[in-house]
Amino acid sequence: MTSSDSALSPPSHQALVVRALLRTSVQERKEILEDVEYNIFAFPAGLVTCDYLSDSGTSAMTDVQWAALIRGDESYGRNWGYYCLLDTFRDIFERGGNRLYAFHTILAGTTTNEFYRSKLLKPYKDSFVNGGPHQLESPNFFIVPQGRCAEFLLFSTVKEVMSESPPAENESVPSVVISNGFFDTTGANAAAVGFVLETFTQPGLTDPFPEHLFDRQNLFKGNMDIAAAELYLDEHPGQVALILLTITNNWAAGQPVSMANIRAAAELARRKSIPLFFDACRFAENAWFIHAFEAEYSNKSIPEIVQEMFSYADGFTISLKKDGLANMGGVLCFRDEALFTRRYKGIGLRLKERQILFYGNDSYGGMSGRDLMTAVAGLYEVTKESYLRNRIGQVRSFAQKLRANGIPILSPPGGHAVYLEMNEFFYGCDRQPGDFASVGFTLELLKEYGIRAAEAGPFGWQWDKQTPENRGKIPNLVRFAVPRHVFSDEHINYTVAAIKQLYNRRHTIPNVEITRGRDMRLRHFSCGMRPIAVAQRVTGSYLDEAKRQMLHLSSAVGLDATKRNDLVDVLELTMSDWGQALVPERINTSRWVSHVSNDHSPFEYSVVLDQKTGEAELRFLIEAQLSDREGDGNFLSQLQEKALQLTGKIADKYNTAISLDRFNLIRDLFMPANPEGKFSAWHSYAAGKNGPEWKVYFNPCVVPGRDKALAATRTAFERLGMADMWQLVEKTLTPGESVIYFSLDLSSDVGHARVKVYISHHSATASAIAQKHVALCPHADAYEIQRFCETMAGGSLGPYEGKLLLSCFAFTTRAPGQSEGTVHFPVDAYAADDEEVGQRVERYMAAVDAAPLYRQRYGRVISAVQRRSLDQRPCIHSWVSLKQKAGGRQSNTFYLSPVLFAAPSLDLSPINPITNGANGATINVYVYGADGNGYFGAVTSIGGFRYL
């Protein structure tokens, strides 16, 4: 067996019974959602394909549990399931590896009178489960129908006992419960009887966590913030009645709590003389995390770890519907003769009275004998390491598949559920907490795909009714609670694919408003709602929209506040006289139609990402426009004058960093009296590491004709004292290549200021382009260039007959004869949509082993500017480039359109397909127009697949 074989985890079970699912249509589910007031809890479960609403009571039972169920005893008084449950709790929570397994005798039907006397009726005292006469005299174990009933018993009875014992003079009534996190019913039960809730969760819950460490490290994000809790206790002496530790922390995305933190919480409780209780619903999953990620427990068994965990607690509540694998049941128990019972004298008998009054005889507490037996068997099942490895592994696999598809999740995944991180999910969409957009996501997921999940964020935690301080503590999550033993990989894969499709069109997901029951407790179970459509078109000005997107982009690439503010200032400078105009729904062809971006917006964004480090640079390119009062804007000469004015403004504002000396040397070559072509001059700004960087892009074709463009370029290099550098490029030009752009850095540092020339390649192959770069650039790598082109083209090495590829060659006077080369691929013309582009970028990132930060920033950058589904055109992506530098350093730049205008109605018609003789890949190029508004471009089909 190899080392890799030994790391494999074998299956933990087989499925022997299946249940068929009812197939429903989108329209049918839509109508039912309307019928139930858009409350997902009211949607019929029989019409759901994958139900992640809860893992409580939804597990598939094991064959041992079914065998135990048949042995259920429905006697009213002291059924044998009662005795089994009592002794099972001693086995699981107190005996560690020294279990007695008394229930095996009951299960086998081999009981005797002596067995009852010596095993089931044996006196026990001073533990969680008194036995024999002590359970009658000092009851401390209470069976209830489910976990929330145990919570109600605990909080209501404690409050009642407290109210009957007025505090002494100068003492305060303990009215506060503190916790690492209250789940909804827990908090509601405590608050309903008058307790004030204070949450102290370890900071950093939503901080990123690297996927490659999922199975190696855990930060135990469910921990209590001990320092903050102690500070609160010091500032509020005598006011805290109870410390509650939730394990795992369901409020904090099912994150585990470390043994060290449990121990510290117990020590704090002991020093402050405050009882420590557990909400122990998922105790076994928490024990597995301790076993896996706390070094000192790696050689401890799960039963031994559980024993130590509970040795620190005064009592606990538990829902047997989670880590009991039962469909019903709950328990409240506490240590006899411990701090809790000393503080609240006689509380055991008071609890028993209330248990019988509300739920039934104490030997069944509202549970059937069958459920008692299944819970007994289930408690042993969930503490098996093989079960826990499979259980935690399925949740982790679900999370990894989501991450692989670019879906933001809270990391690392917890034990019972995967949580989508919805602030990141809606990044760039400008959703506010009170929009309840995450509820809108759950409605769309249910309507479109029959998948039910639960919002665990602003709506569920009642953000709209909280203080500003508490609002800041509320996470914005959607929970996918995975039922135990129920779902296969097919269910998980279907769910991942559905979430991915919604993520790609997240801008269309509706907000939600509450129509009924806003002020109800636990309103998410019962209130009425309705979806509110979100406006898709831009309603503000050019400047407003540029600022909005630029701020999102700044955050996406990690710029500090100073650089963000600088970018906003630059936008105001470059758009001061025309940016206040409202963005029209359609391109106005009566005015100048800009070619800066592929959607004809007058500006374009670009983001440079270093492949190995993920280091980023944010830039934008802009064409100065005429304001509405300055004429119809249809004459290039007017735009040329506006470009000159903007150049002057830039020089005035950045006078120490900018020099126009070189600009003035060549200005007449590219700015003639009667310019022609698609543009006169564009300006580019980059938020560089060493300060602002400005450059101007000239149009060598401003006087028509390839030869004239070459001549203008040649003369420009001569005037700049760089004639020999241009000669290196010109002698490699083929008849099918032309000069398209001439770029000039406006830096006052002339030695480092670059001159760049852009060459277009007609019908070129990736190999031919690579050879040109190798001939001109000392750091060029032909293989990497061909791999880049092939991946961006969807598998073709050319010749590329659609939109022309470009090569950029950059020169400086400081390094004469040396050029840095960049290949620009017009990816929008060779892919159907942004979704396909994204898939190619993902493949490329994998091929070059791009840094995790590169991957993260790329995804956030696309989210920052996206406003419609990624499978719609026009594309956000217009170009992707590859730049090669000394030492094998490579970076990619993504050129992104703002997509300001409504998507055109496309009329696609194919031209002749082109087959690359080298590898046989077929490229079908499609030409389309847009309602006479002057928008045109191409969509391609690779390998015989047509994308419409």
Image (cartoon, rainbow, N blue to C red):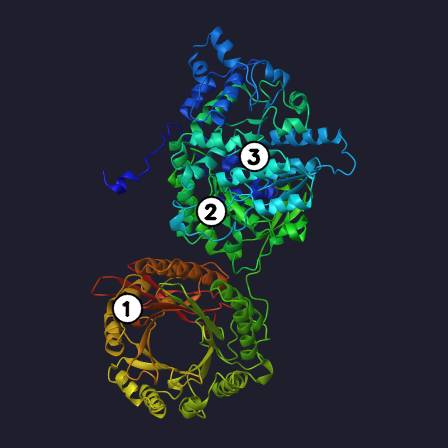
The picture quadrant where one finds residue 431 is: bottom right
Q: Is tag 2's residue or tag 3's residue first in the polypeptide sequence? A: 2
737 vs 647, nearest the viewer: 647
Q: Callout 1 environment at 10 Å: few (<14), some (14 to 19), or many (20+)?
A: many
Residue at (79% x, 36% y) in the render: 169
User: Is 518 left, or right, of 495 in this rendering?
Assistant: right
The residue where tag 2 is placed is 219
Tag 1–tag 2 contact (CB < 8 Å)? no
Residue sitting farthest toward the top: 113
The residue where tag 3 is placed is 279
User: Is 545 left, or right, of 695 in this rendering?
Assistant: right
**Element type at mark 3:** strand
The picture quadrant where one finds residue 766 is: bottom left
Q: Is tag 1's residue or tag 3's residue first in the polypeptide sequence? A: 3
Q: Which mark is residue 785?
A: 1
Residue 323 in view, yes or no? no
Reply above or below: 903 against 146: below
11 vs 816, nearest the viewer: 816
Residue at (57% x, 85% y) in the render: 631
Quadrant location of the N terminus in the rendered image:
top left
Q: Position of residue 774 (x, y in %)?
A: 24, 75
Q: Callout 3 environment at 10 Å: few (<14), some (14 to 19), or many (20+)?
A: many
What is the CA distance from the residue labelled 1 to the residue labelled 2?
Answer: 41 Å
Quadrant location of the C terminus in the rendered image:
bottom left
**Element type at mark 2:** loop
User: Is 450 left, or right, of 12 in this rendering?
Assistant: right
Reply above or below: 106 against 153: above
Tag 2–tag 3 contact (CB < 8 Å)? no
What is the CA distance from the residue labelled 1 to the residue labelled 3?
Answer: 58 Å
Residue at (52% x, 41% y) in the render: 261
Q: Is tag 1's residue or tag 2's residue first in the polypeptide sequence? A: 2
Residue 113 in view, yes or no? yes
